Image (tube, grey):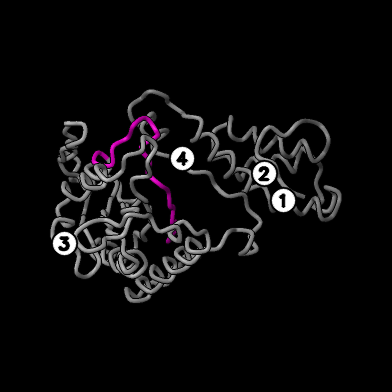
Amino acid sequence: MAIFRLEAKVFSREKRGRSVIAAAAYRAGTKLKDELRDKIFDYARRTKGVISSTILAPEGAPGWVFNQGQLWNAVEAGEKRVDAQLAREFILALPKELSAEAQFQTAVDWARKELVTSGMVAEVSLHHDKAGRNPHVHILCTMRRIEGEKFSAKKPREWNDVALLVKQRESWAEAVNAALEKAGRDERVDHRSLKDRGLDRLPEPKIGVAATAMKRKGVLEDPERFRLVRKVKLINDALPFIRAIQHHGHIQHYGMGASRFWDKTAFLMSRVRDQAKQAVKNAWQKLVGTGRDKGPEIER
């Protein structure tokens, strides 16, 4: 099933003195030297996870912007503040139903149309995990326009406009759906929120790279983020039953007592560990006034 995701965030120096050189090297699976800190960041060994990477720039841009090391060192050197915003990053989910070539071309075409034409320089990197279940693209963009042979003196404020982000989310959904249609696939993505789509579900939280790394390295067998995702999934599985009870005002509409209702719900969710199942049971108990809900709140 194709999944929509467009996440945009600003990469700044204020968080633990991060280097945009390190970020660029990691995303492209390369080895780069940070001239400002005289430090080398070597991520060339992770090339198996990086399928393709390229730098896009506006027409007439100087040749040095296509050199990864020169580009991001120029970004670092051009920002003097200790809390400077260095780059904007877009993280885009791609349908696993598409070939790697189609995935990368879809992202490149979108970045060129939505980002580069406004003056940004963008580095597009396609990543696949080992299982092939999470194809996604990182687009690392400059915060300043290219003007002649150098970056602009001022950062364009319009690039931070929320309305622009809304437009970008919609255009990415359109780009993905066009690629799926071209490939002869029936799957489609939707950029709208669950509420706007009329879906009565809680949004599933992201697990995130930190929790994934802790689990992979054995630091924690079952990190909190994994438990939270399971709890939300359980709540969503139970929501149709809970909403029906809220609508009719009593359990007997189903011709079953409270214990039988819970047994049915628990059976449907038996694939999840007991600890996560308890979260949904708490939500059910809240409805019948016998306990507290310790999981995510459900709006009436």
User: Where does label 4 land, which residue?
Assistant: 207
* Earlier-in-chain disc, 3 versus 4: 3
Which mark's residue is nearer the viewer, 3 or 4?
A: 3
Q: Which one is nearer the viewer's eye here, 157 or 269? A: 157
Q: Position of residue 152 (x, y in %)?
A: 30, 57
Residue contact at pointers 1 and 2, CB within 8 angstroms: yes
Q: Quadrant of the N terminus?
A: bottom left
Element type at mark 1:
helix
Quadrant hosting residue 260: top right
Q: Which one is nearer the viewer's eye here, 169 or 241? A: 169
Please give the range of residues in magenta: 1-22
* Earlier-in-chain disc, 1 versus 3: 3
* Earlier-in-chain disc, 3 versus 2: 3
Which mark's residue is nearer the viewer, 2 or 4?
A: 4
What distance separates the C-alpha of mark 3 from that of mark 4? Answer: 40 Å
* Earlier-in-chain disc, 2 versus 4: 4
User: Does residue 5 show up magenta in the picture?
Assistant: yes
What distance separates the C-alpha of mark 1 from that of mark 3? Answer: 61 Å
User: Where does label 2 land, which residue?
Assistant: 265
Q: Position of residue 55 (x, y in %)?
A: 21, 58
Q: Position of residue 98 (x, y in %)?
A: 31, 64
